[in-house]
Amino acid sequence: MTSTPLAENPLLVSAEATVDYAAVRPGHIEPAVRELIAATRQAIETAAGRGDAPDWENLVEAIEDPSERLHRAWAIAGHLNGVVNTPELRAAYNDCLPLMSEFSTWVGLHHGLYARYRALADSPLYGQLSATRRRIVDLALRDFRLSGVELQGEARKAFARNADLQAQVSQKFSENVLDATDGWTLLITDEARLQGLPENVKASARQLAQKAGEDGWKLTLHMPCYLPVMQHAQDRELRQTVYRAYGTRASDQGDPAFDNSESIESLLALRAEEASLLGEPNFATLQLETRMADSTDQVLKFLRELAAKARPSAERDLAELRAFAAEQLGLGTLEPWDVAYASERLREQRYAYSDEELRPYFTEHQVLQGLFQVIHTLFGVHLEACDAPTWHADARIYRVLDAQGEELGRLGIDLYARPGKQGGAWVDSERSRRRHGSALHRPLAWLTCNFAAPHDGGEALLSHDEVITLFHESGHAMHTLLSRVDDPGAAAFAAVEWDAIELPSQFMENFCWEWGVLQSLTRHADTGAPLPRALYDKLIAAKNFQSGLQALRQVEFALFDMLIHTQQHGLSISAVLDTLDQVRQEVALLIPPAWHRFPHAFSHLFAGGYGAGYYSYKWAEVLSADAFAAFEEQAHPDADGTRNVFDPATCQRYLDEIIAVGGSRPAAASFQAFRGRAPSLDALLRHSGLVQSA
C-alpha cells in the first residue's frame, strides 16, 4: 500500500480543525497513526519524567493535546471502516490495530505516569481541583489499576499480549458478521413468491438485481429487507429460507470462511484470563467495577425479577398468537419463521392497522424536521445543515447552534443501509468538548443507522420502529454534543457508567408516542397530511403489543451474556450454546431450532463493548422511564387538549442535571439531582404495560 506524505495527510490536522473525510484514503491511516502515537508517547514520557510536583497543567493537560489528535484520527479511521468498508480500508485499519492496542497497553502499564497521578491524588493540590477534575484523577487511577499497571514480570507481559489479542479477535468477529451478511443474497424470479411484501421493499430488491445484471428480485440479510420478509412474505418456505440464513450467519451452519466459533471461544478465554490477571474471579465482576451495578448477583437478581414480572404477560401473548395462527392462518405449529408474520397479522386484525400503513406518513425529511423541533424544545438548540465534506453521498453534517447562534458542535447523520456498512445503529464521538486556554474544541459526533434508501427518485420512508431508533440515537448524540464539561476525561462517552449510558437515548424514545410530537413528525408522502388521530389511537392501543415477549427476549440476551462471563475460565462453543439453551429453558417461551446460531452474530457482546454489559439496556430503561415520568407528572394540556410534556422547568433541569454534566459525577448522583430520589421500577412496568396504570 502506498503511503501519503505526512504534510498532505488529512488526518494530521490540528486538534481544532475540521477533517475532510472525503479526502481520507487508506494510505493516510498508518502514517498518521504512527506519527501521532510517537508524539503522544513523547509527551507522556516528558510528563512522567518531570522532577517537579505534578499538577493539572504539567500532567493531565500536558498529554491531552497529542492524545486528542491521536484518538480523533483513530476514531475517524474506525468510523470509515464501519460505514464505507473496502478491502483496502480494512487492511489499513487492521494493520494499525496492533499499533493502537500496543500503545494503549503501554499507557496503561506506564509506572512513571501512574506514579505521577498517584502523587497528584495524594498532594494538597488535589483538594484544590474542581470536583470534576478530582473525579478525572480518580477514574484515571482506577483505569490504571484495571489496565494492569500493578502487575509485574510474566503477568505484565501476559496482560499486554491479552489486550492485543482481544482487539484483533473482536475485529475479526465484526468482519465475519459483515462479510457473512453482505455475502448472502437470494434471487427470486417468480414474483408470486414475493406476495405480501411492501412495494418499496420489492422495488429495492428489483433495483439490486438490475445492478447485478440479473432479472428478478434480489433479497439480502440487511435489516431493511430481512425484517419485511419475516413480517409480510406470505410464502412460508421463503420466510424459512431467509430466517435460517440470518440465524446461521458467521457460524458453522453457514459459510465456514466466516465462522465465528473460534473467535467466541478465544474472546471468552482472553476475557477470563484478563480478569484472573487482575485478581478478579471472572470477567463480569471485572466489568462491574466501572458500572452502576454493584455485583453480578445484583444484576442476575434484577434480570430474574424482571423476567418474573414479564412472564404472565408473555404467556398470554404467546397463547393468543398460537391460537390466532392456528385458527386464522392455518399454522397448526407456529415455527420460529412464522412468529413475526403471524404477529403482524394479529396486530393488523386486533388494531386494524399495520406498520406499513404508517410508513408513508414518516417521510425522512419530515421526521428529521420533527426530531430537530423536539431537540429544540427540550434543549433550546437548533440543528442547521452545513456544506461540509462527508464520507459518503448519503451522509450530511449539521451544526448544533445555541439560542444566540453560537456553534456548540457538529453532528454527522448517515441513515441508509448499503454494502460495506456495518449493520445496526450507533453514535460515535470523533471529538469531545475541551476548553484549552482560551480555545474551545467543540464536540463532533456521528449518528449512523441502516434504513432503506429511497428509490425511483422518491423520499425515504421510515417505519415507526425506525423513527424510534433515530430518536434513540439522537439521545446519545445530544449527550456528547450538549456537554458543558470542558475536560474530555469527564465526557459522556468517556466517564458515564456503561449501564447508565443508555438513559439519554432510551429517554428520547418516549417522544415517539406523544400525539403532539407525532403531528410534527408526519406528512403523508402523497397527500402531505399529518397522521390521522384515528390511526394514532390504533398505534397507541398496540404500543405494548407482545411487550411481555419482548421483555423476556431482552432478559434472555442479558442473562446469557452475564452467565458466559461469570465463568472462571473460557468456554467451548458447545458450552456457550448449552448455556444459551439453559437460559432459554429458564426464561424464554419462544425457542429457536437447534441449528440456530444467535451468539455468532451477537456483535454487541463480542465486537461492540457490551460483553458482561447487555443488561445495561434494561437497567438504563428503568432510569429513562423514571426520568420521563418526571415530564409526565408536569404535563399540561395545550389549547386543543393535546398533552404537552415539555414543561420548560423540567426540560431545563433534565439538560442541567443529566445531559450537560456528562460524566463529571456518578450517574446515580446525576439521577438523584434530577429526580430528587433513587430510581424506581414502577414507570418502566407501567410504560411497558406490565402493570395497569393507576
Image (cartoon, rainbow, N blue to C red):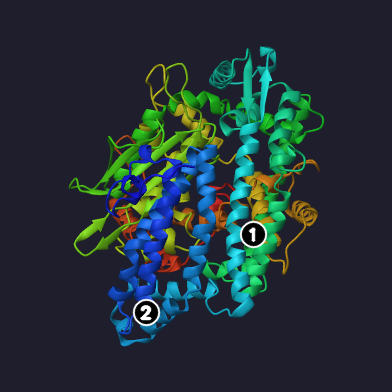
Q: In what element is the residue under mark 1?
A: helix
Task: Identify which residue is drawn at 38% across, 21% down.
Answer: 529
Q: Is residue 304 above or below residue 318?
A: below
Residue 230's image quarter?
A: top right
Side (left or right) of 333 relative to 217: right
Residue 125's image quarter?
A: bottom left
Per the model, the C-alpha gap separating discs 2 and 1 is 48 Å
Q: Mark 2 highlights which residue?
A: 49
Task: Identify which residue is drawn at 69% across, 66% down.
Answer: 566
For the image, the number of numbered tags is 2
Q: Residue 3: which disc?
A: none
Q: Position of residue 379 (x, y in %)?
A: 30, 49
Side (left or right) of 403 relative to 472: left
Under mark 1, the amino acid is Leu
Q: Position of residue 101 (x, y in %)?
A: 52, 60
Task: Identify which residue is drawn at 30% across, 44% down.
Answer: 377
Q: Mark 1 highlights which residue?
A: 303
Decide: few, some or many residues near mark 2? Use Cα within 10 Å; few <14, some 14-19, many ≥20. few
Q: Is residue 249 above or below residue 307?
A: above
Q: Position of residue 519 (x, y in %)?
A: 38, 31
Residue 372's image quarter?
A: top left
Decide: few, some or many residues near mark 1? Use Cα within 10 Å; few <14, some 14-19, many ≥20. many
Please say whether residue 345 is visible from this viewpoint: no
Viewer-proximal residue, 420 or 405?
420
